Amino acid sequence: MILATDNCGPIRRFWGNDYAITRTIDGGRQLKVSGWGSIGARIRQGDYLTRYKVAEVEYSLDPDDMWHATLDFAPRQDIKEQQQ
């Protein structure tokens, strides 16, 4: 499991790698996002993107580095507890 709280997990935000929030649900407690690029590891269910945990992720076939995910808000104290 990749625990990243200050960036976009294994997807670093730079030219050719990025993500966009496409929908907020329940006042921001859940997000729908789309992204592209995979330098190294792909994101997976259970990974963290900033303060959100990946609940579901699906990769496109073309282009194969594009993904769509549902993220659930995960307060920072929950992340610290899981690291222990």
Image (cartoon, rainbow, N blue to C red):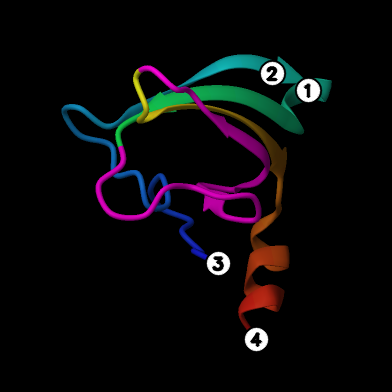
Tag 4, which secondary structure?
A: loop
Circle 2 is placed at which residue position? Answer: 24
Callout 2 touching callout 3 (CB < 8 Å): no
* In front of the other: 65 or 3: 65
In the rendered structure, does residue 82 fall within the stretch colored magenta? Answer: no
**Amino acid of disc 2:** Thr
Question: Where does label 3 land, which residue?
Answer: 1
3 or 1: tag closer to the N-terminus: 3
Crowd around label 3: few <14 · some 14–19 · many ≥20 (10 Å): few
Q: Which of the two marks, 4 or 3, is nearer to us in this view?
A: 3
The relative height of residue 64 versus residue 73 in the rendered view (above or below) is above
Mark 4 or mark 3: whose residue is earlier in sequence: 3
- Near-viewer residue (47 or 79): 47
Amino acid tagged 3: Met
**Magenta stretch bounds:** 38-62
Query: Alpha-carbon distance for marks 4 and 1?
Result: 29 Å
Residue drawn at (42%, 48%), measured in percent from left and top?
Answer: 42
Residue type at the position of mark 4: Gln
Callout 4 touching callout 1 (CB < 8 Å): no
